[in-house]
Each structure stands twice: as structure tokens, then as C-alpha cells.
Image (cartoon, rainbow, N blue to C red):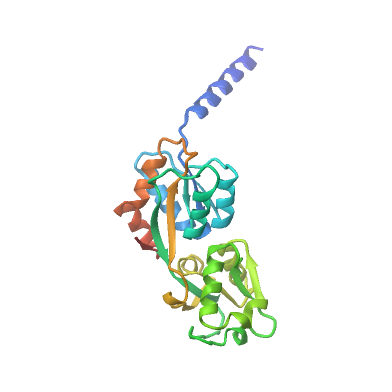
Amino acid sequence: MFRKMIFAALALCATSAMAQVPRGPLVLAAASLQESLNAAADTWAAQGHPRPVLSFAASSALARQIENGAPADLFLSADEEWMDHVVKAPGGRIKPGTRISLLTNSLALIAPAQSSIRLTIAPGFPLAAALGLNGRLAMGQVASVPAGKYGREALIALRVWSSVEGRVAGADSVRSAMALVSRGEAPLGIVYATDARADRKVRVVGIFPANSHKPITYPLARLSASTNPDAEGFRRFLASPQGKAIFRAYGFGTR
């Protein structure tokens, strides 16, 4: 009996100690930021702060979670439209004065690393022919996922969208689209240039001209529901020269 009481007391102390461990801010971030934002969180934690809790998904999915009241501290989107969606949600979902455009990116056409496909991205380029008889083009969902929207816009500008529209393998995030190419399930895909750097099983066939789509920008903001005392500090760190240098090391441009 006495031994059971000791064990119970120790368990209670452990639970109490765990409850007192400070938690870092919860950050909802676009899927394309996995490596770079983890590196930034590690650097922040190394400076003596609780490590931020990172949750990655398509910006569209995260914005809808925020709109529905998901508790979080920061939102880092892969396009301005989904941040606008959060801003316009009933009651307003971001803290005024905290929104900034933090990063930029490029759009890449990728193939499996062992693929022999060669294409020059230009108006009217033979994308459909390069897919082969039954091949599909892996992209984020073109109605919602930012990389998919940018990709569709670029293909329309280059006058090839109509030839591949019915052959798109729509994915729920840019990383899911890249996985289809990485596994050899799609001969070609459209992702961010930074994504292609993160997977050795894919290679870049070409970069889409910057003028073929809207500028790819990543806005950052603190959410109005945020209560974590470290949230504003981490937001400022990401926007600092040190934070931006981390993102540049992973291929992003900074604003």
C-alpha cells in the first residue's frame, strides 16, 4: 500500500512538472515550408525558447481550419489569397499590424530523377506529348491549393492548359503532388522550386517564367486567437535578417 502511494505521488509530481513545461507557439504553415521552418524553429529553440509546434498542410486547408476557430498562434500561407480569406472571416482572424509578405518562390516542372524527359518551357511547349499516352500531370488542386492555382495560371498563359486539363492528377497539397512524381506514379508535376530541392528522387525539368503567373509570395501573420507569450517574438524572428537567411538557405527569396 505504501509503495502504491509513493508511485501515485511520483506520478502526480511528474504530471505537474509536465504541465509546467512551457509550450512554444503553434504555427500553421504551408506544406512547402517543412524543411526551412523546422530549421528556423530549431534555431529559435537553441536560443533558449520553447520550440514552436509546427503543423503543415495546404494553405487552403489551414485557412479553413482557422476560419472554423482552430486555436493557433501564427499562420504562414503560400499565397496572399488564403491569408485574405482569413482576414475576411467573421470577426477577423489575424491581429492588426502583424501581417507581412515574408517569402517568394518559383514554380518548377519536375520529373522523376531517372526520367529522360527534356522540355523547354515556352508558349505552346509540348507538355501533353511529354506525358505520354496515359501519363498524368501531378499538381495541387487547381481550385484551392496555391501551387495548383499558380500552375494552372502559368499553363493558361503559355497556351497549353487546354491540352492537359483533363489529365491532371490533383493533390491536396504541393508535397502530395511531388510525391506522385517521386514515386514514379506521374511522369511530370508542377511544384515550387524549393520543393524539388527537398527530394532527391525528382529533378527539375524547367522553371516557369515569372511573368506567366502571379508573384508567389508567402504572407505571415499572428492570429487573433493567439495567447502564447512567445508568438510575437517568433514572428519577429522569422522576419529578422537571421530568420530570412535560414529561408534563403533553402532556396526561398525574401521580401
The answer to whether 37 is drawn above or below residue 195 in the figure is above
Residue 123, percent across and down? 50, 86
Query: Which image quarter is the N terminus in?
Result: top right
The answer to whether 221 is drawn above or below residue 176 in the figure is above
Name of the residue lying farthest toward the top: 2
Query: Which image quarter is the C terminus in?
Result: bottom left
Residue at 60% across / 65% down in the picture? 143
Compared across the picture, whether 97 is left or right of 198 comes to left
Q: Nearer the viewer, residue 213 or 172?
A: 213
Residue at 48% across / 65% down in the picture? 198
Residue 188, percent across and down? 58, 77
Compared across the picture, whether 42 is left or right of 160 comes to left
Res 180 quadrant in image = bottom right
**Res 181 visible:** yes
Q: Nearer the viewer, residue 200 or 151?
A: 151
Residue at 35% across / 46% down in the picture? 236
Residue 129, percent across and down? 61, 87
**Res 113 visible:** no
Residue at 47% across / 73% down in the picture? 213
Name of the residue lying farthest toward the left: 241
Q: How many numbered circles are shown?
A: 0
The answer to whether 61 is drawn above or below residue 145 in the figure is above
Q: Nearer the viewer, residue 110 or 212?
A: 212
Residue 87, percent across and down? 49, 49
Compared across the picture, whether 137 is left or right of 86 comes to right
